[in-house]
């Protein structure tokens, strides 16, 4: 299975690559201005987190928008990738009232394949100044934390997922399980 | 699929052999990364490789002797360069952490280029690992800190760079080191700029001596406690000298002394970390020993921050 990581400049982009690699996916980190045609035939895409503020600065998000518009296989947006997904598809992202750094607890309200086999409450690691403030049309919120209402979201029909927290870091509980579930989704959408 | 150290070693030995037709030097600090890279490169190049260790004067207690011994045991051709008298003057008056890192990085390269010239090498092997270049930033990525082996390199450097461990994380490098028979495979990470980034404020020989003494105690006590099963051995554990003086009382006399912070964190790859839950009896021993054995320190505090929001090192 081929799932690539689009690099938006996050500190943990390389961790996403590593987790996917450990789970047996064929993976590669690609620049976020890579032509859509070069991603043809991939089974999934991860839009990485970014350097500060890039999620709300479309100028720095390269071709992320084109990927979201034209890609059929599942896409997982993380942090800046998640914020950009919301903004690009008609929702909004803006500075968080309470930015979160480090340990936090998320609660899953809406069961979803992405969280299959996981408890409803678990510990995650955060690192964000901005957050999704308004869901795009046809998106539903899946999870929240004390200071952030939209910790996870998905499109009703298309395989588009966004996570505010970072499943790729070692200290997030069940992080690898979330990636495993995402890979299963990629497999079943083939 | 787990990481396959044996396959990695075979692949990289071959790759190094291909990319270095002549001679190379390797910058070796004695840590896990550069020692593993030195053994890899030495397998590939034999006597065409010279490992260069620079004693910057910013090393921990007993470190230089220990590194020399390790390289000898591993039969890696090496040279120890004593250069404390070049580093301290370069650091005089500097308090900004990024400036410290870049001054030290430049000094390192200057010395390595000198050594390479003498040895006739045109390649520089480095034990750079993934977090080093990730945190050093570049293009989109924000700079968290300049790792001297990445951000400190001059653009016009004549030596060609070889970085066999570039895509690995610490836990993977440890697996490689174990497979190569490197004794220091489980050693805690130690920053390239050494104790200079564990002295907040100006770096002077006296202040480095203070933090060296305090760090040795932190290491001894935590290793002893872990050995007795009181706590797991943390990912990293050390002392930081703060630029703060506070009031104390010693034998009915007012003193105005230095403050040391003890830092210990648990992590697997250094990219995220939680502060270690050290038992109070161990903290107590550390505090009593530091304030009694290291002259000039009258206060010890424990750092209870995770990464993020903090980083492991203070600078």
Image: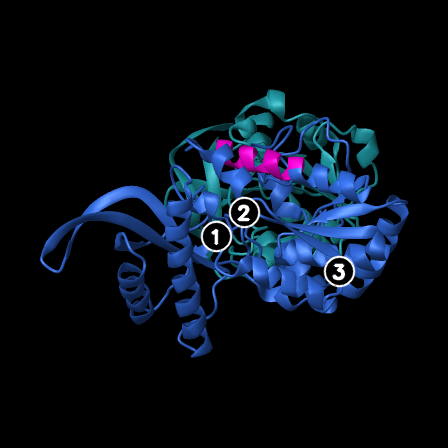
Q: For the point 76% across and 29% down, which residue is it?
A: A34
Q: Is residue B209 left or right of residue B46?
A: left
User: Does residue B79 show up magenta in the picture?
Assistant: no
Residue under label 3:
B76
Residue of label 1: A124
Magenta: predominant secondary structure element?
helix
Looking at the figure, which quarter contains the N terminus of chain B? bottom right
How many angstroms separate mark 2 from mark 1 (CA)?
7 Å
Residue under pointer 2: A166
Answer yes or no: do the residues labelled 2 and 3 have beta carbons within 8 Å? Answer: no
* CA separation in Å, label 1 and label 3: 44 Å
Label annotation for residue B233: none
Q: Quick one: B91 or A93, which is closer to the camera?
A: B91
Residue B121 coordinates in the image, percent (x, y): 81, 42
How far across and how far down the image is residue B62, in percent? 51, 61
Q: Nearer the viewer, residue B122 or B244?
A: B122
Instruction: Tell me which chain appears blue.
Output: B
Q: Quadrant of residue B133?
A: top right
Q: Is residue B106 located in the magenta-colored stretch of the structure?
A: yes
Ranked by sequence position, the earlier of labels 2 and 1 is 1
Region of the chain picked out in magenta, as a range = B98-110
In whole angstroms, how far apart are the C-alphas of marks 2 and 3? 41 Å
Helix, strand or loop at disc 1?
A: strand
Q: Chain of mark 2?
A: A
């Amino acid at each position: 299975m081929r799932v690539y990581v689009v690099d938006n400049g996050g500190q943990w982009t390389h961790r996403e690559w590593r987790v996917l690699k450990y789970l047996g996916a064929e993976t590669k980190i690609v620049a976020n201005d890579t032509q859509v045609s070069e991603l043809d035939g991939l089974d999934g895409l991860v839009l990485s987190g970014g350097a500060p503020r890039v999620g709300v600065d479309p100028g720095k998000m390269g071709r992320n928008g084109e990927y979201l518009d034209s890609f059929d296989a599942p896409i997982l947006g993380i942090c800046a990738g998640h914020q950009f997904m919301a903004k690009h598809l008609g929702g909004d992202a803006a500075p968080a009232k309470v930015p979160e750094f480090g340990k936090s607890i998320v609660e899953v309200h809406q069961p979803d394949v992405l969280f299959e086999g996981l408890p409803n409450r678990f510990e995650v690691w955060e690192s964000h100044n901005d957050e999704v403030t308004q869901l795009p049309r046809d998106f539903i919120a899946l999870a929240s934390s004390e200071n952030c209402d939209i910790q996870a979201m998905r499109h009703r029909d298309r395989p588009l997922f966004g996570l505010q927290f970072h499943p790729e870091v070692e200290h997030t509980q069940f992080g690898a399980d979330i990636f495993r579930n995402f890979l299963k989704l990629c497999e079943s959408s083939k | 699929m787990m990481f396959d150290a044996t396959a990695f070693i075979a692949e990289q030995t071959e790759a190094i052999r291909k990319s270095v037709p002549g001679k190379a030097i390797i910058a070796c600090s004695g840590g896990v990364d550069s020692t593993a890279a030195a053994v890899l490169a030495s397998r590939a190049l034999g006597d065409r490789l010279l490992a260069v260790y620079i004693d910057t004067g910013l090393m921990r207690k007993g470190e230089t002797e220990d590194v020399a011994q390790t390289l000898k045991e591993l039969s890696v051709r090496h040279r120890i360069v004593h250069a404390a008298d070049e580093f301290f003057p370069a650091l005089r008056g500097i308090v900004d952490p990024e400036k410290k890192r870049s001054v030290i990085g430049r000094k390192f390269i200057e010395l390595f280029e000198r050594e390479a010239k003498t040895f006739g090498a045109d390649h520089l092997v480095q034990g750079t690992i993934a977090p080093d270049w990730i945190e050093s930033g570049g293009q989109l990525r924000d700079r968290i800190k300049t790792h001297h082996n990445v951000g400190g390199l001059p653009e016009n450097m004549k030596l060609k760079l070889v970085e066999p461990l570039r895509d690995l994380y610490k836990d993977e490098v440890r697996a490689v080191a174990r497979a190569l028979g490197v004794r220091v495979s489980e050693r805690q990470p130690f920053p390239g700029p050494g104790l200079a980034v564990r002295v907040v404020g100006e770096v002077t020989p006296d202040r480095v001596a203070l933090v060296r003494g305090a760090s040795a105690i932190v290491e001894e006590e935590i290793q002893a406690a872990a050995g007795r099963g009181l706590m797991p051995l943390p990912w990293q554990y050390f002392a930081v000298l703060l630029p703060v003086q506070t009031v104390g009382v010693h034998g009915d006399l007012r003193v105005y002394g230095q403050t040391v912070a003890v830092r210990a964190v648990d992590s697997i790859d250094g990219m995220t970390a939680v502060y270690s839950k050290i038992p109070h009896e161990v903290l107590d021993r550390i505090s009593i020993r530091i304030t009694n054995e290291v002259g000039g320190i009258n206060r010890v505090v424990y750092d209870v921050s995770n990464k993020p929001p903090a980083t492991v090192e203070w600078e």
